[in-house]
Amino acid sequence: MIGTAQPDGQALAIKGLSLEFPTFSGSIKALDNVSIEVGKAEIVGVVGESGCGKSVTTMAATGLLPKGRYNITGGSVSLFGRATLTMDDKELQNMRGKVVSTIFQEPMNALNPTIRIGKQLTDIIMRHEGTNLEDAKQRAHDILADMLIGEPERIMRAYPFELSGGMRQRVLTAMAFSCNPGLIIADEPTTALDVTVQAVILRLIQNRARRTGTSVIFISHNVAVVSQLCDRIYVMYAGRIVEHGATRAVLDAPQHPYTQALLRCLPERLAPKQELEAIPGAVPNLMHPPAGCYFQPRCGEAVERCRTHSPQLAGSDAQQVACWQRGDGVLILDKGHGNA
Ligand SMILES: Nc1ncnc2c1ncn2[C@@H]1O[C@H](COP(=O)(O)OP(=O)(O)O)[C@@H](O)[C@H]1O
Ligand code: SF4
Ligand SMILES: [Mg+2]
């Protein structure tokens, strides 16, 4: 599905989410007015450098951030029509696995090292689906086979440490899909793996999601990875969405200087012997973000008002961008970010 998700077809609707982490030396403004929609059966990518708020966004949306360590300062989150920010621990627990599952980068943190794979997988299926052990074993076997695991029986008898990184990530992917959740959050699921294994696992996630109508949010710092898999892309910079749109539109005609810079950094896009670019500078410290556009200190196109006022997202349904030098970036006086 391409285009903005329709309200009745939404798996996830994050609207204007703002979040801070209080610390002794001040608040880290990790998210500022973040809105992300994922339609049913839609695969959506979130891309941006490390520290831009990709994980915090989805963790906050699914209640995975440590309680009492952050403040939501604005916005709402709805998962298949249910508000998640006000859910208690029990409601969140019931939702995980069955409604939403997350695949993280390092499977060793998500797998229990002392329990065989088969037991971990069947326990999840029995707990969420209420099936008996025999049925759960059959389902575990089938889903491992579906992840192109040649000998599911052997893998079910194994402990996590006996498996390669790629095999552990397949197992974790199988676990995420095992209770047929409506939404899978894949947070840099293959970053630690080599490129060939990475490509296979990404395709497995995409194929199963397409076949089962599962919605997916794909988080990556690599715009190439996200673009191969996703219907739409959100580009995040320093806790703000700076561009979003249909994948083709964003790739063929990137608007935001940050998106353009991310694309210039892709080795795949270089002509022979052309030097690989890196974006100069770094993501700002979110305890003391710059006034105006957060990308301004790194932007070659900055003009005076970029230093004083934040551009808001503007454009069509197919593509929106927050930049004074593009389209009709509406002048809105910023509150609360030290801007004039
Ligand atoms: N528990 C936390 N306490 C304080 N700051 C945090 C915490 N978790 C994340 N942050 C900060 O929030 C920002 C966004 O982090 P994150 O979402 O992990 O980035 P990404 O996933 O895009 O790499 C970073 O500046 C990070 O340092
Ligand atoms: S608003 Fe200004 S500083 Fe920000 S990306 Fe656009 S041109 Fe660059
Ligand atoms: Mg992250």
Image: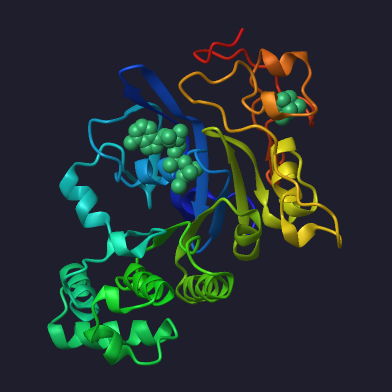
State the residue in front, 250 or 7: 250
- In the picture, residue 102 is in which quadrant? bottom left
- In the image, 154: left or right of 340? left
In this rendering, is residue 115 above or below 34? Answer: below
- Residue 188: give x, y in percent of width and height: 48, 57
- Residue 111: give x, y in percent of width and height: 26, 66
- Residue 157: give x, y in percent of width and height: 22, 86
Name the quarter where the C terminus is drawn: top right
Looking at the picture, the colour scheme in use is rainbow
> Which residue extends farthest left?
132
- Residue 198: give x, y in percent of width and height: 53, 70
Image point (28%, 90%), residue name: 154
In this rendering, is residue 245 above or below 126? Answer: above
- In the picture, residue 140 is in which quadrant? bottom left
Image point (60%, 15%), residue name: 291
In this rendering, is residue 197 above or below 83? Answer: below
Image point (16%, 79%), residue name: 131
- In the image, 271: left or right of 139? right
- In the picture, residue 304 is in which quadrant? top right
Name the quarter where the N terminus is drawn: bottom right
Image point (70%, 22%), residue name: 330
